[in-house]
Amino acid sequence: MITREEADQLEKLMGQLGGIHGELAALSKKRPSDAVNAFKLKFVNAVLLQCNEILGADYSPIGDFQEFNSDDVPSNSDVTFVAAQYLQALEKFRSDNVILFQGRWLYDLPKNTPEMRASAPAKLKK
């Protein structure tokens, strides 16, 4: 069970990280070893830190990884790889916190909290 605030944050982070992944995957196809610029890296790290907060140790996709080191700038393919791992972890967390109720997928929120619709759990890649 998660709070409504956590569910809202989760939805936001999945959208942001999905956007990051999509943009950097496109760059990675053209130039996989090019470095991510400082502006993008700052944004990526901010999103990853928020992901780490919501996922906690139980859902952490990459051990004790917290963020990219700005002194050792990652490549487009590095960030794409990490974003994909985080997207999978976020979806696992989300899937573990949704329920099917009367034919509708909802977040499993505390009683007396207004319901919040969710999409069906995605089939996770193994």
Image: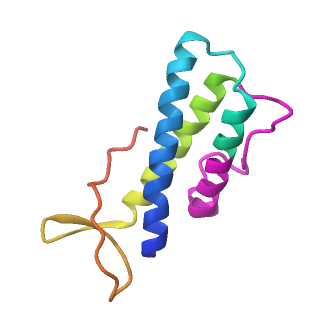
Q: How is the image coloured?
A: rainbow
Q: Quadrant of residue 78?
A: top right
Give the side of residue 94 with respect to residue 55, left or right: left
Pick out the residue farthest to the right: 71
Residue 63 within the segment the image draws in magenta: yes
101, above or below 31, in the image: below
Quarter of the figure that contains the C terminus: top left
| x and y percentages locating residue 3 in the rendered image | 45, 76
Q: Which residues are magenta?
A: 46-74
Going by the image, does 9 lie left or right of 120? Answer: right
Q: Residue at x 72, y 50 (%)?
A: 66
Q: Is residue 46 left or right of residue 116?
A: right
Numbered marks: total: 0
User: Of all residues shown, which one is farthest toward the front?
Assistant: 39
Check residue 32 for magenta coloring: no
Q: Name which residue lies at 56% across and 38% down.
A: 83
Q: Residue 123 appears at what percent x and percent y?
A: 32, 44
Is residue 11 toward the left or the right of residue 98 in the image?
right
Q: Furthest residue to the bottom?
A: 112
Residue 67 in picture, x, y percent from top left: 73, 45
Vertical relation: 63 (above or below) 114: above
* The N terminus - image quarter: bottom left
Residue drawn 30% across and 80% down?
114
Q: Quadrant of residue 124?
A: top left
Classify residue 31 by image quadrant: top right
The one nearer the camera, 28 or 19, is 19
